[in-house]
Amino acid sequence: MNKKDIVIKENIEAVAKFLEETTAYLVESKEGSCNFTFAGDQDVALYVGWAGGHAADEETSIHLDSDPTYALEAAIKVRQDTDKLDYEVFGYPRYVADENATEQAEEVFDTTAVLTPEMTKKEYSDMAKKFLEEYVNLVNAHNKGDITYE
């Protein structure tokens, strides 16, 4: 997959719009997750949702009022048959274990970004471009056999 075919203005604008609108929706609804499916890809998608493990006093995160250790994150994750699950249920693509390894690879292809309060359109656009570039890297690594979606 070629970055020049994917990381284009039209796609950056579409992903940035998804990020901005989804952030507003999830801040208002205070639950769930949403996904953006890359054209024709049945394996991975860009998800936005609430994730735990954040410091409650982080000022650079959008926190859940009912539990401030949860903040809004976005990441490319493995698709599942339902979109009704919590963000944290969706798994990350994983690096394939070395052929000499005795255990399954545990290292994940982590593209997580934390959404921040009062992001500008430029910041959403920059984040969208980063996700599109990471998507191309992920698909290319998967096609070479370096990444698994299992």
Image (spheres, rainbow, N blue to C red):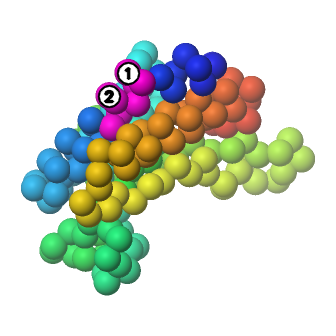
Q: Secondary structure at mark 2?
A: helix
Q: Could you tell me which quadrant the C terminus lies in?
A: top right
Residue 117 locus on image (x, y percent): 26, 63
Please say whether residue 78 is visible from this viewpoint.
no
Residue 22 locus on image (x, y percent): 22, 44
State which quadrant residue 98 falls in.
top right
Give the main secondary structure of the magenta stretch.
Answer: helix
> Which of these two is toward me, 123 or 24?
123
Q: Secondary structure at mark 1?
A: helix
Q: Which residue is mark 1?
A: 10
Left/right of residue 66 with respect to residue 93 in the rendered view: left
List the single residue furthest toward the bottom.
57
Dots 1, 2 in contact, CB < 8 A:
yes
The type of residue carrying mark 1 is Glu
Left/right of residue 128 with respect to residue 87 in the rendered view: right
Mark 1 crowdedness (10 Å alpha carbons): few <14, some 14-19, many ≥20: few
Left/right of residue 91 with respect to residue 56 in the rendered view: right
Q: Could you tell me which quadrant the N terminus lies in?
A: top right
Mark 2 crowdedness (10 Å alpha carbons): few <14, some 14-19, many ≥20: few
Please say whether residue 57 is visible from this viewpoint.
yes
List the single residue furthest toward the right.
100
Residue at horizontal 39 percent and vertical 59 percent from the top: 114
Residue 103 locus on image (x, y percent): 76, 54
What range of the chain is rendered magenta? 9-16
Between the C-alphas of marks 1 and 2, the distance is 6 Å
State which quadrant residue 9 falls in.
top left
Q: Is residue 30 magenta?
A: no
Q: Which mark is residue 14?
A: 2
